[in-house]
Image (cartoon, grey):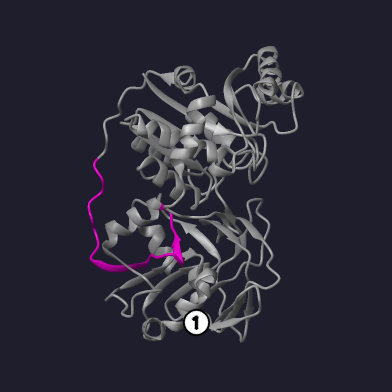
Amino acid sequence: MRSRFLIAAPSSNSGKTTLTLGLLRLLHNQGLKVQPFKCGPDYIDTKHHSLAAATQSINLDTFMMSAKHVETLYNKYSNHADVAITEGVMGLFDGADRMKGSSAEIAILLNLPVILVVNAKAMAYSAAPLLFGFKHFNPSINIVGVIFNFVNTESHYRFLKEACEDVGIEALGYVPANDLVKIPSRHLGLVISTEHDYDAIAAQISKTVDVEKLLAITATEIAIIPEKPDLPQTGKLRIAIAKDDAFNFTYYENIEVLKRLGTISFFSPIHDTILPETDLLYLAGGYPELHLEALSANTEMKEAMLRYCNNGGKVIAECGGMMYLGKSITDKDGNSYPMAGFLDINTSMEQAKLSLGYRTVNSFFKGHEFHYSTCKELSSIKRVGEVQNAKGIKVDTPIYKQNNVLASYIHFYWGEDQSNKAFEALLSI
């Protein structure tokens, strides 16, 4: 018997990520093989998952991926796991278009029981109608248990247990408010660090959550599926990928596809002064705005980047990568820092405004836009592609094409591309 479940919540900020991280670390410390997944396009929570579980976390997204691809990824990575924990996104039923792309859609597709995390800080027996509504809203969803967050006393928890009894959902325990287990946030999500004390979160959960019961009610007989061998490397491209504290927002399956195209090397625009010999440069997004002094001071790397782009080098630059290729980035205090200078744009963190949502380009390529910076074009720059949101409405997200450089705020997903044809088409937009 192996345990499979999805952790969801009625809304964002209910504490499902902290609970997920604590469970991952707790079960890992118990010697179990734990496989984490994340619903949606989030590339930050997966980093936390991977650190907490010592296993690579995988994105599952029914907007950017086909249903078959989601099932394939889930079966591939959970195949030999004792416990597979999938963390939901936003509220259980919140999708890009009603339920499309929601945690609920993933739970239905993969037939996963749901553990609901409820913020009960200012709630007692009123949890009953909330739980009743979530349990009965969609009969395809199987909510088997609930864990209450921000509950500081046993007496408070007793009211919540009574609510569960009357609704018919298993009460699995609670987690008190505790600054020691709180992970700080930045403007794009939780702070990425290896210093977070996942063990402290795990220790707290072990005291007040019935983890054995959780595993028991989510246990199922699952046959191990024969694994298909990974596709061989078919290309001979040299591919350089930016990877450091400023550039690290990547989808794991995207990198797996690139590995089949050739040889991967990683470099740091912050610390390195030489650009690797490469046929394709991937400048992923990240937090360049937090490392402006170091990026701007590394003139050797900026000059190498500019030469490569001017000489026709192929580049995919996403969000932070696009910002780095511009003339400058301005921080929230109005200080401007020179960047590589290839694209005639300035980006700024002043008057930060959230731009968020799924994107479809030319009715084919899928991706996600998530940033607070603004972009100003200093001259006429070639734009390519027609960009739509999840509802098919045209949006003004720019995709710049200059020489062989494709640059945009969009984080593209090409991890489903087994033939590499779609990825090649992306380069030639």
Q: Regarding mark 1 in the picture, which secondary structure is present there? A: loop
The residue that label 1 is drawn on is 339
Location of residue 37 (image quadrant)? top left
Amino acid type of the residue that numbered disc 1 sits on in the rendered structure? Met
- Vertical order, 423 against 349 (above or below): above
- Vertical order, 400 against 87 (above or below): below
Q: Is residue 195 left or right of residue 261?
A: right
Location of residue 328 (image quadrant)? bottom right
Q: Nearer the viewer, residue 295 or 173?
A: 173
**Does the segment drawn in magenta span residue 183?**
no
Q: Is residue 54 left or right of residue 7?
A: left
Residue 215, given in percent of the width and then of the height, sits at 45, 22
Point 63% across, 51% down: residue:
390
Determine if residue 290 is in view. Answer: yes
Please give the range of residues in magenta.
229-251
Q: Nearer the viewer, residue 6 or 126?
A: 126
